Amino acid sequence: MPTKRNSLAIDVDSRTVEVGSDGRFAPRIPDTPERQRLERQRRIREVVFGAQDGVLTTLGIVTGIGSATTDKTTILLTGFLALLVGAISMGVGEFLGNKTEREVVQNTIDFEQQEMLDQPEAEFAEQVAYYRMKGFTDTEAQTIVERLAKNPDIWLHEMVRDEFGIDVREGQAAGPGSAFGMAGSFALGAAVPILPHVFTSANVAVWLSLVLATGLLFSIGVLAGRLGGRNPIVKGCEIVVFGAVVFALSYLAGHYIPALLGHPAVSVGG
């Protein structure tokens, strides 16, 4: 006789989650607006990291080239190639990095799921031990795990969270949005140090690039500080300091390395 399908509604913080089952109580993992909002905030990483890397990388390149030569075409061509190659590299790297990370996580989840199928008693005892470490009594821990054992999806979620510190949703495939976000933000950040060289001479553009890059880096730091719960001004200044170090090292490299190779040094700004 076929099992009659039934459903159950569970209230989670005043939100109703519909749960379906086929002969067993097997609810899905309830999601919340709070977790979804956190995921969106975490994705700002691509924007912050991409733009910051774009600014620092291209600032270093155009500063180094700009302090070694005053030829505008050379500077612009080098800067554009740095923007193009950097954006593509960042996008591909983000996509492959996320894909590899998801594969590693999913492999871990699959391994744990297989262990739960092959060694249910050992996994049961292991889960009881985790709840004992959380302060539950033996009876309470066993009661909880007995209930979890009747809900394999939730039990797997709890096991990988307690044993590996991960969420089973981390193994789910994601779209290419993060890769495009990383590439786009890198390109936007990289364009900032390049633009002054389009409209003015190399001597002026090197310093104007520094000013514009400093402003953008500070803005990125303020945004990152607010999202991370840190002092936005302090975070902004922190990122600007790194930008200043990149500028100084690039300027010195572009000014003195050509002389070591027999090319006359170029005095920028004078």
Image (cartoon, rainbow, N blue to C red):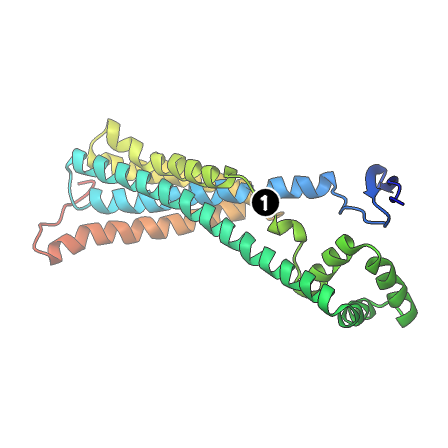
Quadrant of residue 71 within the rendered picture: top left
Mark 1 residue element: helix
Q: Residue furthest front?
A: 1
Q: Residue at x 54, y 41 (%)?
A: 44
The percent coordinates of residue 87 (x first, y second) are: 37, 40
Location of residue 198 with respect to 45 vertically, above or below: above
Q: Residue at x 84, y 41 (%)?
A: 13
The correct choice, above or below, for 201 with respect to 167 in the image is: above
What residue is rendered at 72% in x and 38% in y?
A: 33
Residue 165 at x, y percent in the picture: 66, 61
List x then y, in percent, for residue 234.
53, 48
Nearest the viewer among 96 and 118 is 118
Q: Nearer the viewer, residue 131 or 247?
A: 131
What's the amino acid at mark 1? Arg
Q: Is residue 106 left or right of residue 16?
A: left
- 179 or 250: nearer the viewer: 179
Q: Quick one: quadrant of the N terminus? A: top right
Q: Residues within 10 Å of mark 1 (few under 14, many from 20)?
A: few
Residue 6 sits above or below residue 132 on the image: above
So how many labels did they put on this image? 1
Query: Left or right: where does residue 76 sit relative to residue 167?
Result: left
Where does label 1 land, which residue? 42
Counting from the top left corner in percent of width and height, residue 146 is at 87, 62
Q: Residue furthest right?
A: 139
Q: Is residue 1 left or right of residue 186?
A: right
Q: Quadrant of the C terminus?
A: top left
Residue drawn at point x = 89 percent, y = 72 percent: 138
Position of 75 with respect to 85 (left or right) is left
Residue sitting farthest toward the top: 199
